[in-house]
Image: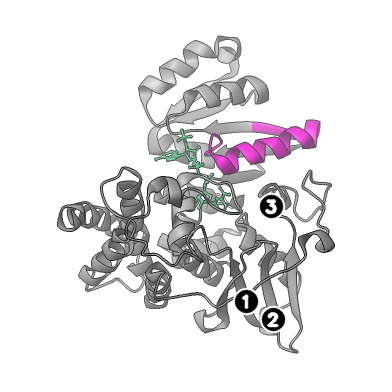
Amino acid sequence: MKKIVILGSTGSIGVNALDIVRRLGRSWQVLGLSAQNNTDRLIEQALEFKPSLLCVSQPESAKKLLGSLKPLNGSLRVLTGPEGLEELAAHPQADLVLSAVVGSVGLKPLVTAVKKGKTIALANKEALIVAGDLIMKLAKRHRATLLPVDSEHSAIFQCIGSEPKKHIRRIIITASGGPFYKRQASLESVTAEEALAHPTWKMGKKITVDSATLMNKGLEVIEAHHLFGVPYDQIDIVIHPQSIVHSLVEFTDGAVLAQLSHPDMRLPIQYALTYPERLACPIKTLDLKEVGKLEFYPPDFNRFPCLALALAAGRKGGTMPTVLSAANEVAVGLFLNGRISFTDIPAIGEEVMRRHRKPSANPGLDEILAADAWARGQAQTLEKVTA
Ligand SMILES: NC(=O)c1ccc[n+]([C@@H]2O[C@H](COP(=O)([O-])OP(=O)(O)OC[C@H]3O[C@@H](n4cnc5c(N)ncnc54)[C@H](OP(=O)(O)O)[C@@H]3O)[C@@H](O)[C@H]2O)c1
């Protein structure tokens, strides 16, 4: 029996993960689930999977849950707020914690799970972007295991297998290019609806906009740097519109391994959940004759400035990625609410980075949280500047 806690169970990753758990059947027990506000979906999930702990952001939502989940009340506790998420992440009986919340709200629960030495399936990339050095150091100290859920990092993880790090010459991360890669016209007037129409993946709103600006790919380079301990000079990006090759690893002898499959997050989620086991997964079988062609292009750094910003932040290290990620979260929210244009997103990220004149080189958790809060405040004020 494997016992799992899912932070962010009502989101795109969370729902797919529960689909996997449902198919895996009785050998899995769901101990805890969480949502921000989507109580209706959380109630449905709780009635089906019968966890003993739930967490929501607001106390009013907790009351609604308890009211609607009377049949489970004897065995159910409802937690609230960031502290509730941390308690969920530290669940003493959990064999696996899947972190699938979006944004740096996932940082403290991740730190908590790592300090408890948990095995963590990590989808919430922002936590690793804002505090990569700290998380990896703590993971080593507390013998926690981080298993990647992001499809590119899952692919890299699978390609590396048991190869020692010294055998890796290069990591090549693929990117679909998002909805605007081939668009000739200016990106200034792009609407939220257009940005949310991803050509190959169906995901939550924040990551979908990040994919359209290519910020997501830049953040993934930082994520790969931390997860696999590979220097930035040895990580490349290639645009691959079909999203069939999920990433590649080149080894010292020149051999390049890749992982291919149709774009369906259930495969990397399941791999993280069942690792090192490989079980049947309900994804479409890959028939390369049907796919026909696989294309690869260099990324366009001029039209997608978020890419260069993220790489610069990653190379600078310390609190610079923290600041960029936090400013980007705010900017994406402003864009989705129609307050700024698509091209203001990199402008805000760049300006907040420029204002962060003295990034701390080796920050602890408090410094990281302070830098995150500072960058959010700066990004909010920049809305007025760009308006
Ligand atoms: N979706 C993908 O295919 C994909 C692929 C690779 C990596 N990822 C990464 O996985 C993470 C989740 O992505 P997603 O697409 O699943 O996002 P999503 O659909 O927006 O879901 C986010 C989840 O987090 C919860 N949440 C949001 N803000 C919160 C807050 N302030 N406090 C507590 N809970 C909060 C949401 O609750 P409500 O439902 O109540 O709002 C929901 O359960 C992101 O870091 C993303 O970059 C996603």
The disc, 3 or 1, on the residue closer to the chain's N-terminal end is 1
Which range of residues does the magenta coloring cover? Answer: 8-30
Q: Main secondary structure of the magenta part?
A: helix
* Secondary structure state at the residue bearing disc 2: strand
Q: Which residue reaches farthest front? A: 185
The disc, 2 or 1, on the residue closer to the chain's N-terminal end is 1
Amino acid type of the residue that numbered disc 3 sits on in the rendered structure: Ala
Please name the residue shown 66% across and 62% down the image. Answer: 242
Q: Name the residue under label 1.
A: 171
Q: Is residue 325 above or below residue 361?
A: above
Q: Is residue 227 above or below residue 2?
A: below
Q: Residue 4 carries which label?
A: none
* Secondary structure state at the residue bearing disc 1: strand
Please name the residue shown 49% across and 58% down the image. Answer: 211
Residue 59 sits in which quadrant? top left
User: CB at mark 2 closer than 8 A to ligand 1?
Assistant: no
Q: Which is nearer the eye, 330 or 375?
A: 330
In space, the residues marked 3 and 1 are separated at their CA atoms by 20 Å
Q: Mark 2 and mark 1 in contact? Answer it, CB < 8 Å.
A: yes
Q: How crowded is mark 2: few (under 14 residues within 10 Å), some or many (20 or more)?
A: some
Q: Which mark is residue 250?
A: 2
Residue 238: image x %, image y %?
Answer: 58, 74
Q: Mark 3 points at which residue?
A: 272
Please name the residue shown 59% across and 18% down the image. Answer: 75
Q: Residues within 10 Å of mark 3 (few under 14, many from 20)?
A: many
In the displayed structure image, the side of residue 69 where residue 134 appears, left or right: left
In space, the residues marked 3 and 2 are separated at their CA atoms by 22 Å
Asked if residue 102 can be seen in this view, the reply is no
Residue 225: image x %, image y %?
Answer: 53, 72
